[in-house]
Image: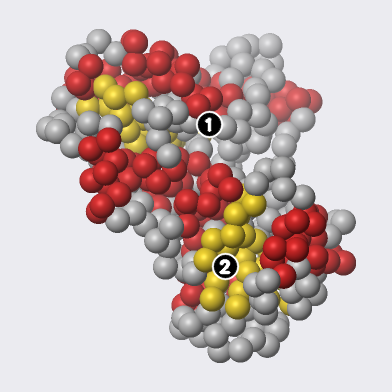
Amino acid sequence: MNSPTAICQLPSAPRILVRGTNWLGDAVMTTPALLRLREKFPDAHIAMLTPEKLGDLWANHPAISETIRFAPDESVFSVGKRLRAGNFDVALVLPNSPRSALEVWLAGIPQRIGYARPWRNWFLTEAIAPRAGSVKMHKRLVGEINSLIAANDRSAGIPPASKKTIAGGTPALPSSVHQIYEYLHLAAALGASPEPLPPQLFVNPGEIEAANKKFGLSKIERPLLGVNPGAEYGPAKRWPVEKFIAAAREIQHQTNCTWATFGGKGDMAIASQIESAMASPPSANWNLAGKTSLRELMALLKVCRVLLTNDSGPMHVAAALGTPVVVPFGSTSPELTGPGLPGDAWHRLLKSDASCSPCFRRECPIDFRCLNGISVKRVVEAVLSLV
C-alpha cells in the first residue's frame, strides 16, 4: 500500500501532537486516521491533546503514546504553555475550531496542519482545502423542511395539509462522504494512507472482569443486551422512550435476555422510566445510567451481544469495540456519521421515509415523523437478526 506524499518533512521518529475532537462519537471516528498515522510512523511519539472528559478513551490504544488532558475552564494560553514542554515536531489539528488552531500556535509547534476554516488559517502552517467529495452537514431551516414535505406530498398525490407519514425520503449518500474520511485525509497530509479502517477501541480482560464484578453482571446466565435511550445532541435524535420499552419487552419475551440500560447522568430519568416499565424480575434488568465511568462503560458494552441505541457516543463506542448496534436514525445521517466502517453490514441502521430527514436539528420543529416512522416491529426484527 503506497502512502501519499507528505506536505512536510519529519524525522523517522517524530514527536506528533494530535489535537483531538471534543465529542465522544467524533473521537471514535478519528481512530482510523490515528491507526494509519501509527502505521506510517511506528516509532513516533504520538500525543493526544483531549478534553478531560474523553481522556480515558485513549487508554490502551496502540496509536497513542501519551494523553494530555485539559479542563473545561482551562484557558487557551494555559494549554499552549503546557504544550511547549513537549517539543513537538508537528501538530495535526482534527477539530475545525479557531481555538484548536490557536492552542498549537501558542505552543510554538513548528508545523501545524488542519483544515482551512475562517478565523484560524493564520495559526496553521498548512491549511488543508476541503476534501473532494466531502459533504457538509446542513441544518435545515423550518421553511425548508415544510417545503420538502409539501413537495413530497404533491408528488405522492397527498393534500399538503395531510398529516400522514410521507414517502420517498432524502436520497442516500455514498459511503465516501463519511466523517472518517475527513480525518484520514488530514492524516494523509503527513504521508499516512487514506484507505479506510473500521474505528477501533480497546479494553483488556481485567477491565471487563472488574466492571462485571462491580455491577453484579458476572453471574448473569441470560444473554446480555444493552439499551442506550439517550443522545446528548438533543431530542431530535432520540427514538421515543415508549418504543424503546415496547421493543425491549418483546425482545426479552423472545430471547429471555437481560437488559443493561446505559447512559450519562442526564439520561437517568429516562433510564428509570424504562426500568420501571419492564415487567420482568429485577435480575433481568440492570439500570446503569449515570453509574459507570467511561472505561467501565466500554468494558460492559464490549460484553453485550447487541446494543439498541440512538445515534450517540455510546453507539460509536460499542461498534468500535466489536459489538453490533441497532440504531433508529432520525435527524442525522448514517451515511455521514454512522457507526463502524461505512457500508458495514454488521450493524442495523434504520431510517424512515421522511422527506425532511436528515435535518440535523437538535429539536424537531414539526411532528417528529422521522423517528415516529420507525416501528417497534422493525427494531425488534433488527435486534433479533443479530442475537
Count residues near mark 2 (Cα–Cα under 10 Å), then give few for <14, some for 14-19, many for 20+: many
Q: Which residue lies furthest to the left in this view?
A: 221
Q: Is residue 233 left or right of residue 125?
A: left
- State whether residue 157 appears in this view: no
Identity of the residue drawn at 27% across and 35% down: 214
Quarter of the C terminus within the rendering: top left
Q: Is mark 2 on a helix, strand or loop?
A: strand
Answer with mark 1 or mark 2, whichever residue precedes in sequence. 2
In terms of image quadrants, where is residue 67? bottom right
Lateral position of residue 230 relative to residue 116, left or right: left
Q: Which residue type does callout 1 highlight? A: Ala
* Residue 85 visible to the viewer: yes
Q: Is residue 145 above or below residue 347?
A: above
Q: Quadrant of residue 276?
A: top left
Give the amino acid at mark 2: Ala
At which x and y percent is residue 133?
A: 66, 61
As displayed, is residue 109 above or below residue 158? Answer: below
Colouring of the image: secondary structure
How many angstroms separate mark 1 from mark 2 (CA)? Answer: 29 Å
Residue at 70% across / 82% down in the picture? 7
The disc placed on residue 47 is 2
Residue at position x 63%, y 11% in the image: 162
Q: In this view, does 207 lie above or below 164?
A: below
Q: Mark 1 points at which residue?
A: 231
